[in-house]
Structure formats: structure tokens, C-alpha cells
Amino acid sequence: MRQVPFHRPAIGPAEEREVIDTLRSGWITTGPKTKKFEQEFAAYVGARNALAVAHCTGALHLALFALGIGPGDEVITTPFTFTATAEVMGYLGARPVFVDIEPDTFNIDPAGIERALASGTHRNVRALMPVHFAGQACDMDRICAIARRHNLKIIEDAAHAVGSARMIEGRGMVKVGTIGDLSCFSFYATKNITSAEGGMITTEDDALAAKIAVASLHGMDRDAWKRYDSSGSWFYEIHDTGFKYNLSDVHSAIGIAQLRRVEELTRRRQAIARAYNEAFANDPALEIPITEAGVEHAWHLYVMRLRPAALKVDRSQFIDLLRARGVGTSVHCIPLNTMDFYQQRYGYRTGDFPVAEDVYSRCLSLPIFPAMSDEDLAYVIESVRAVARESRR
């Protein structure tokens, strides 16, 4: 029986060469390869500044820190995301204010943001944190307009969005990374490009970039490699509160090779998504994901929904039947308001966000990774169709 995992990283000779070159250079922590990765990523998204960090969680934390978010402040985001999005707010004593998602894109609903701000309940909102779910950019024209009216900052959670772009009024098609005040990317093993672990913050604001650069490495005024290369000095000063969020050159080496392949990797994801859409579009038991007009979807995830009325099995059983056929799947995402921590800490309850909870109850994510062969893809399609057919009422 064929086995198709949920994910397999697309690592090859280019990544191996970059890592070996780094290991042989004698410099493996944060240094010249990390600076190169930052420069090439900034050029790719068209950003003025890019700062490499240890992971996207750290990127989100540093972004909030740089904006001065602190105790008692509120940040509006979505419950339909991984916990890191909201978790980092707690690091600084701030509170996540959840807003429900759109039923088609699974992105935060701008009308819900407006309602939350107009409710009078949330008087300490300082920022918005939209999540570009699965690789489809949020409606940033509307979100930016809301931010301007209410004098709010925007931190884009772009963990899923390397390669994503959207039509922006007056600018045309714009890659995610230069729309909000700060954008935070992930290079985790499953992401569109990987550095095994890692993240990046992009911003057009030089002052924010400078603050993040200092805060990402203990509040020091210079990078370690500047202290220990031939032109550096042993002396350093501490200028601010700092954290240990620097990215090593070994990780950056993988990221550099992956970034140079990003268009190739994105095209393969898009081709897999098209094949899934064509295969499942007319199945009465399945709902395919929707792509909005004016969006270049990066397809970090392919999230399909089941139609329970058409099936005699539930979502968990459907997943088990696929697993029995050797097909790996996952579920994205469990709404944060249904989790004990967010209920105990912030008073959220199951039922607070019906759209997110409905999507969660019916969704599953299929394998969509560039290393999938055509035979793997055909097998996943055949298996999903067979399980849907055999499970139909």
C-alpha cells in the first residue's frame, strides 16, 4: 500500500551545499549567512527591512514588543489560528480579542473587527493581527482602512503566507510583507519554504527595525559576528530589554537555498491545489476551498470541508479511513476559544465564534507539499474519492 505523509520537506542538493559551506566556514551562529538571508528575503517581498529570528512565535512577540504593547492593552485577532498568534500577547500582559472568520476564506472578518471596535467593550485595542490563513491573504484594503480610522497598528501573522499576494488599491498586486506595519513569517519544517526552524519580520519602518534588531539578541548593540570577526570589538552595551531570538547561519543557509527555489515550490503547491479542486469540485460530500479574486494563493494548506448530511461518518472517522489507506492528514485549526487555557485566562467559551467552530468541525487538511510525486497526488485523490463514495448516505 502506498504511504503519503501529510508533509515531507523539499530538501535537496542546493540546501546541502549551503549548509556544508556554512559548516566549513567556521561560523555557524548568527553571522554573514543570516544577513544574506535577510537581504534576499527583503528583496523577494519588496520590503525595506527584514530581520531573521529563531521562529515566527518570536517574530510576533518582537513585533508586539517593538510597538510598545503591554499590560492592559488589547489586540484583535482570530480564534482560527495556531496558539502562537494569541499566546505572545500574554507574554506582554496584553489580551487577545477574538473576532470570527469569513465562512469562505477562513480569514478574519473585517466586519467583525468593526463590530468589536464599535461595541464599547474593548476600549484598549492598540493593534490588529490578521492571520493570512492557509496562504490566502486577508482583505487588507478593508483592514488597513479600519486601522487608519481607529489609529491602530497592524501586525500581519504571515506564517502561512510566503509567496502570497493580493491586489491593494493604488499599488496593484502586492506580496504579503509590505502591507501592514510589521509582517511575521515562519520557516518551520512544514511551511512553504523552510529553514528547519526560523522566522522573519519585515517592516518599512526603520525605527521599528532597529528596535527589533536590538531586542532579538539580549538588547545588545551589535551582533555576535561583528564582535568576533576581524573587524569587530569585544565591547558591547545593553540598550534595552532583550530576548534570545537570533537565527543561526546553519538555519539561514537552508533558508537561502529554499528562498531561491520559492517560485518553483509555490508553483508545485498551486498545481496540487488545482488538481484537488478539479477532482473534488462536484462531489456532494466535499467542499473545496475558495480563492478570492485578486489573490495569489500560496497554498500552504489545502483545507477541505465535509458535508455531514451527505456522509454516514464524522470527520474523525473520515480521517481514520484515509489513514488506513496510507494517506496522512491534519486538522487546521482548533479554535482557541474552545481551549481550556483561553477559557480560564480570558473567559472565552465554546460557542462564541460559530463560523470558526463550524469550519473546524468539518475540515481536514490534505497533503500539499512540493515533494509529492504525481503518483502520490493521484493516490490521495483516489483515496479521498473512495472514502467519500463508500461513506455516503
Image: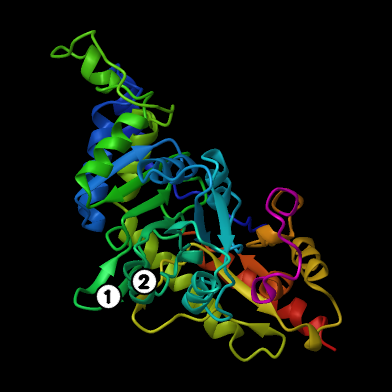
Disc 2 marks which amino acid? Met
Relative to 170, say whether 341 is above or below.
Answer: above
Furthest residue to the left? 231
Q: Is residue 357 left or right of residue 297?
A: right
State the mark number for residue 168: 1
Alpha carbon distance from label 1 to label 2: 7 Å
Circle 1: residue type: Ile
The mark nearer the N terminus, 1 or 2, is: 2
* Residue 312 visible from this viewpoint: yes
Residue at 27% in and 43% down: 208
Mark 1 in CB contact with mark 2 (< 8 angstroms): yes
Q: Position of residue 242 (x, y in %)?
A: 40, 27
Give the structural element (helix, strand or loop) at label 2: helix
Q: Dividing the image into 4 quarters, which one contains the N terminus?
A: bottom right
Camera-side residue of 141 and 166: 141
Residue depicted at x 31% and y 18%: 238
**Would you say 244 lies left or right of 166 here?**
right
Where's residue 350, x and y in %? 76, 65
| Residue 357 figure quarter | bottom right
- Visible residue check, residue 1: no
Question: Which residues fall within the magenta stretch?
Answer: 343-356
In the picture of the structure, the residue carrying the numbered disc 2 is 140
The image quarter containing residue 276 is bottom right
The answer to which quarter of the image holds residue 366 is bottom right
Instruction: Please tell me whether residue 256 belongs to the stretch shown in magenta.
Output: no
Q: Going by the picture, which residue comes out furthest to the top?
A: 234
Q: Which class describes the residues within 10 Å of circle 2: few (<14), some (14-19), or many (20+)? A: many
Viewer-proximal residue among 51 and 261: 51
Residue at (39, 34) in percent of width and height: 251
| Residue 330, percent from left and from top | 67, 60
Q: Secondary structure at mark 1?
A: strand
